[in-house]
């Protein structure tokens, strides 16, 4: 095989390996966002619905600030077994490709390169340890005027998936940016 083909293949494989590394690292990244949501309710019924929602999602109330109408919930995020296995499989395929290219470049070391596959489960372990963490949801409620119908503005600081689930479950509208 030509040297230029081997070198370009090795370079592309190394670039793909770097991308895979950052993909695995990003799998456990915190994705907290702040969203402003409109509810068609006010007062006690809205607060009860929110409490039932978060209790049903295994969150517990950790603080209430009546002066700012802010409530903070905390729950534990469970890591996904499927994603841990999937990341380990992706790492195994990436390591296998890298070992194949390295065996073409360094034929004398080709016997030992498949041993790199023993590193593949580290991707799943990395995800599993980093993804299982306590998650906080900060919720601030502002009651808007009752003209023409009662509305409330909820400012939610939480993981983006939790914000999406809250919107869908309670039928809240996303307030457009100013």
Image: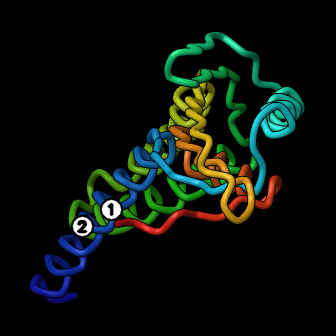
Horizontal side of residue 98 vs 117, given as left or right = left
Is residue 141 shown left or right of residue 13? right
Res 125 seen here: no
Residue at left offset 56%, top offset 14%: 65
CA distance separating discs 1 and 2: 6 Å
Residue that badge 2 annotates: 15
Q: Is residue 65 above or below residue 94?
A: above
- Front in this rendered view, residue 38 or 136: 38
State the colouring used for the structure image.
rainbow
Instruction: Name the residue located 33 percent from the left edge and 62 percent from the top edge.
Output: 19
Badge 2: residue crowd in 10 Å (few <14, some 14–19, many ≥20): few
Disc 1 versus disc 2: nearer the observer: 1
Query: Under tag 1, what secondary structure?
Result: helix
Residue 119 point in image, percent of width and height: 48, 38
Q: Does residue 93 lie above or below 43 as drawn?
A: below
Q: Which disc, if any, is residue 19?
A: 1
- Judging depth in this view, the residue of 14 and 134 nearest the camera is 134
Q: Residue at x 60, y 21 (%)?
A: 72
Q: Residue furthest front?
A: 147
Res 156 quadrant in image = top right
Quadrant location of the C terminus in the rendered image: bottom left
Q: Nearer the viewer, residue 132 or 42?
A: 42
Tell me which residue sits at (59%, 48%) in the image.
144
In the picture, which quadrant includes the N terminus? bottom left
């Amino acid at each position: 095989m030509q040297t230029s083909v081997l070198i370009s293949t090795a370079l592309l494989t190394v670039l793909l390996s770097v991308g895979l590394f950052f993909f695995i690292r990003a799998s456990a990244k915190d994705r907290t966002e702040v969203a402003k949501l409109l509810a068609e309710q006010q007062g006690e019924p809205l607060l009860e619905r929110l409490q039932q929602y978060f209790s049903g999602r295994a969150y517990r109330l950790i603080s209430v600030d009546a002066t700012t109408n802010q409530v903070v919930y905390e729950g534990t995020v469970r890591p996904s077994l499927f994603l841990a296995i999937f990341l380990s499989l992706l790492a195994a395929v990436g390591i296998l490709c890298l070992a194949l290219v390295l065996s073409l470049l360094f034929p004398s070391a080709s016997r030992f390169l498949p041993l790199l596959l023993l590193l593949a489960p580290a991707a799943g372990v990395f995800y599993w340890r980093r993804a299982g963490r306590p998650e906080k949801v900060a919720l601030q409620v502002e009651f808007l005027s009752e003209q023409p119908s009662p509305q409330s503005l909820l400012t939610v600081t939480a993981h983006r998936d939790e914000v999406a689930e809250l919107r869908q479950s309670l039928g809240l509208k996303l307030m457009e940016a100013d």
